[in-house]
Amino acid sequence: MPWARTSQFGSSFLTGSGRAFCSGVDLTAAEEVFKGDVKDVETDPVAQMELCKKPIIGAINGFAVTAGFEIALACDILIAAKGAKFMDTHSRFGIFPSWGLSQKLSRIIGANRAREASLTATPISAEQAERWGLVNHVVEEGEVLRKAQEVAEAIMKNNQDLVLRYKAIVNDGLKLDLGHALSFRKGSYLFSALSLASYDKRWSISFLRFRLLL
């Protein structure tokens, strides 16, 4: 099962407690749980991940299967070990994904690839996932957490108010078509300017001047 912790670098790490990231759940036994897609937000791990304002870095150290795959898709950045694999077995058990895998995966790797992965229940290797844009980095086994910390440190060097807002803009914009997403982005410029003002007034003034020139 995955476990999470908040790092001193302003990001949250999510990784597995054993040799697998998350091998999912017993879908046959859990069929009633998944019917109707009705969940308690307070106890739903993916819903809570989506509400998390900080960047979530998933450290995939083994198999991420079905529900585990869905949890991985809820991360903002994915680091995978060379032996890691992603696998959707919903079609094998006749149960629909409960956490949005059917929509999220196609938006990341493309509809044709997502259809093949889900309809055949074929594993996606870490290397293939990186080529398809599902995984950010593939590293040697044992180096996953080190790489995750390295990414977290890079994030921490930036303005943290804007980091949180930037994550929200990207994630919320993915739920919209391009036209509405661009309009949504424009409404965030004022917040960005105010955030930059608290970070450095000179940068705030330059930012506003730049916007006026456009």
Image: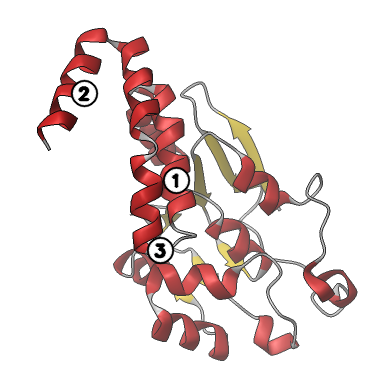
Q: Earlier in the sequence, mark 3 or mark 2?
A: 3
Could you tell me if the residues under marks 1 and 2 are in contact, i.e. CB atoms within 8 Å?
Answer: no
Whole-number angstrom distance, CA of label 3 to CA of label 1:
16 Å
Left or right for 18, reference 27 = left
Left or right for 71, reference 8 = right
Q: Is residue 125 above or below residue 81?
A: below
* Residue 153 visible here: no
Q: Give the image quarter of residue 70.
A: bottom right
Left or right for 91, reference 155 = right
Whole-number angstrom distance, CA of label 1 to CA of label 2:
40 Å
Residue at left offset 76%, top offset 52%: 44
Residue at the disc numbered 3: 134
Whole-number angstrom distance, CA of label 3 to CA of label 2:
35 Å
* Residue 84 visible here: yes
Residue 188 place in picture, x, y as percent: 39, 36
Residue at the disc numbered 2: 208
> For the residue carrying disc 3, how many other residues have a C-alpha within 10 Å: few (<14), some (14-19), or many (20+)?
many
Q: Mark 3 is on which residue type? A: Leu
Residue 144 — which label? Answer: 1
Q: Is residue 108 above or below residue 187?
A: below
